[in-house]
Image (tube, rainbow, N blue to C red):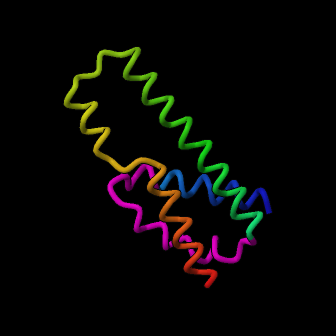
């Protein structure tokens, strides 16, 4: 199942990159995520947390090593971060399982 978990993670990440202002789209992954057992779901969440940490590190690194104008930094900061996505996914999974 880990290959399909990696596939799900990849599709979630790509969708997130194209829809950073909302996480409501995560419900469209119900058919793929709802059947996961607790261990598989926790693995999915752990991988997403790793991606979130890497994205934050990359963003901080880009700001530190480049002369990015303040207005672009602010605009980038206005989009939802990956943590909001993970929280929404956890809430949806709990709802789907109940």
User: Does residue 76 appear left or right of residue 56 in this picture?
Assistant: left
Is residue 30 a member of the stretch shown in magenta? Answer: yes
In the image, is residue 86 above or below residue 49?
A: below
**Residue 8 in which image quadrant:** bottom right
In the image, is residue 47 above or below residue 86?
A: above
What residue is rendered at 64% in x and 56% in y? 45
Residue placed most toward the observer, 1 or 70: 70
Residue placed most toward the observer, 28 or 82: 82
Is residue 4 a member of the stretch shown in magenta? Answer: no
Q: Position of residue 12 (x, y in %)?
A: 54, 57
**Residue 7 in which image quadrant:** bottom right
What residue is rendered at 36% in x and 16% in y? 66
User: Does residue 90 appear left or right of residue 37 in this picture?
Assistant: left
Q: Position of residue 22 (x, y in %)?
A: 35, 60
The quarter of the picture where the C terminus appears is bottom right
Name the residue at the bottom extreme.
Answer: 98
In the image, is residue 70 above or below residue 2?
A: above
User: Does residue 37 appear left or right of residue 91 in this picture?
Assistant: right
The quarter of the picture where the N terminus appears is bottom right
What residue is rendered at 37% in x and 50% in y? 80
State which region is magenta: 16-37
What residue is rendered at 55% in x and 70% in y? 29
Name the residue at the left extreme.
Answer: 71
């Amino acid at each position: 199942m880990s290959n399909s978990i990696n596939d799900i993670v990849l599709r979630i990440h790509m969708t997130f990159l194209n829809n950073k202002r909302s996480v409501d789209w995560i419900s469209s992954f119900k058919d793929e995520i709802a059947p996961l057992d607790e261990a598989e779901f926790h693995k999915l969440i752990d991988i997403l947390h790793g991606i979130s940490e890497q994205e934050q590190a990359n963003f901080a690194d880009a700001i530190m090593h480049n002369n990015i104008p303040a207005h672009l930094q602010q605009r980038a900061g206005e989009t939802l971060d990956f943590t909001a996505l993970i929280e929404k996914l956890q809430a949806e999974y709990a709802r789907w399982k109940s």
